[in-house]
Amino acid sequence: MTLTLQDGWYPIIVFIAYILVIVLIGGRVLIRKKPIGVTLSWILLIIVLPVVGVGLYLLFGESYVGFYRARRAKYAFQRFVETVSTDLQHPLVIPQQFDDPASPLWDQTFGAMKLPAVRGNSVSLLPDADSALAQLLHDIDQAVNSIHMEFYICQLGGRVDGIFAALAKAVSRGVDVRVMCDSVGSGQFLRSDALDSLRAKGIRIEEALHANLFRVLLRRQDLRMHRKIIVVDRWISYTGSMNLVDPVLFNKDAGVGQWIDLMVRVVGPVSVPMKAILDYDWYMETHEEVSHTALPTKLEVDPGVPIQMVPSGPAIAKENLLNLLLTAIYSARTTLDITTPYFVPDDAILTALKSAAQRGVKVRIFLPINNDSFLAKHAGRSFFDELLVSGVHIFPFKKGLLHTKCVLVDNRVALVGSVNLDMRSIWLNFEITAVISDAMLCQSLASVIQGYQLVSDKLDLQRWRSRSLARRILENATRLLSPLL
């Protein structure tokens, strides 16, 4: 007797295939030992929508950088650490357990990555894109040896055209100019007709983390180079939230207003590890090794500002960034100010924020009233109720897309860089954070944040709870995906 699908075997085969998918892919999710929220979200998605869930997991479920890239990353990171920590007795290096408000944060990163904080710097805050672009143009015009830059987004037009014109002039006087930008964030720039012209002028432009569907089996394709770094003559460095764009022109049709950014400019020896981070990323894409510069033996700014530059990413001490943020939150005693365009915390950060407010710390979170990510916007709002109940103050910013990314602890320690307070930044993106202990810098940053508050409306718990049922359902539904954002 021959059995056919009409004999009732079809649903049995489908059911068996469904069970096999759940067991095999679900088991793979479990053995990866991801955070519980991430694990449960993936398993739920695979159970409810097996075809979609399995496809998405195979594409995005694991932060796999590829075998050969992982091997290069291990070698390059060893070189990087050797560059910035060869002599821990160096007079510029801050020792562990140093008496400073930032010591818990510096010790956290040193324990995880052997990267010390470095003194002898001067630091200034560039509170908006206008001041940052003007200062950058000045430093480019004064450069004599090298200008190395790295951004998530590069986009020509407006004042950025002037920056590239200045870079071309720098090349003509013998300056080594390198620009690296992310494959996805700078896709339009990397495919533009102007790219060949810029390269012909001697500007070396490289694509970071090339995204290609044909490479999907070799490495995860949504890992992004999200750092914003500039180093001029190995002594002047910048980092912060600003991409290489003119905010007047950038994304102006997105309906979220002009992007609001800030940068920090540092003059001093911490530019050496900053340059080493750029060299690390350059080697990862080009296989081209760059000779590193050692810390100078002379204090240029005595004693100067102590700063620690903290790189992060899937191939670099994966948990350090999360632990650094948690250390910052738990170390707060009086005030904690956070600005971020995308707010989708995991359970640990959520608990830390509520705990800080409950122990009497004035916790304020500033974020744009609208951003350009539908899922991040609504998933983030699902956390507001429990934060407000705990005493956290939330300020939706009304005058554009607040893109500044900083944490200010007790008005004494500042974390400034490219990190958003979401799981993508913490686990998937390659980011950079400056941990700075300087009263004047923190005072300037507090003034900028106070300016943000003046154009923000503080959320009221009762008004927030009066929003429609449809909005609550949407927020809670997108929250199920929050560990994956």
Image (cartoon, rainbow, N blue to C red):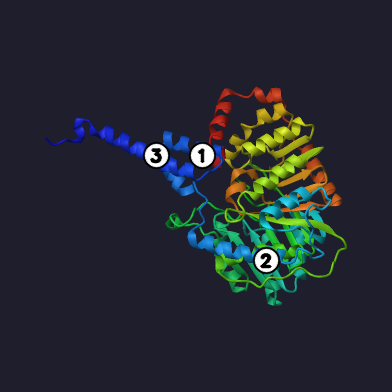
First in sequence, mark 2 or 3: give its number.
3
| Secondary structure category for the residue under label 1 | helix
How many numbered badges does the structure rendering display?
Answer: 3
Vertical order, 23 against 208 (above or below): above
Image coords of residue 381 (percent x, y): 63, 33
Quarter of the figure with the C terminus: top right
Residue identifier under label 3: 23
Vertical order, 116 against 443 (above or below): below
Residue depth check, mark 2 versus mark 1: number of the one nearer the observer: 2
Quarter of the figure with the N terminus: top left
**Identity, as a three-letter code, of the amino acid under mark 2:** Glu
Residue under the point 79% across and 65% down: 90
Image coords of residue 479 (percent x, y): 56, 34
Residue under the point 62% across and 73% down: 201
Q: Which mark is residue 201?
A: none
Q: Which residue is more in the foreground, 186 or 273?
A: 273
Residue under the point 72% across and 39% down: 366
Q: Which mark is residue 39?
A: 1
**Left or right, residue 9 beside residue 302:** left
Tag 1 near tag 3, CB within 8 Å: no
Q: Is residue 258 visible?
A: no
Q: CA distance from mark 2 to mark 1?
A: 36 Å
**Identity, as a three-letter code, of the amino acid under mark 1:** Thr
Q: Which residue is more in the foreground, 49 or 142?
A: 49
Image coords of residue 453 (percent x, y): 78, 38
Image coords of residue 391 (percent x, y): 74, 29
**Left or right, residue 319 beside residue 263:** left
| Secondary structure category for the residue under label 2 | helix
Q: CA distance from mark 1 to mark 3?
A: 14 Å
Residue identifier under label 2: 82
**Identity, as a three-letter code, of the amino acid under mark 3:** Val
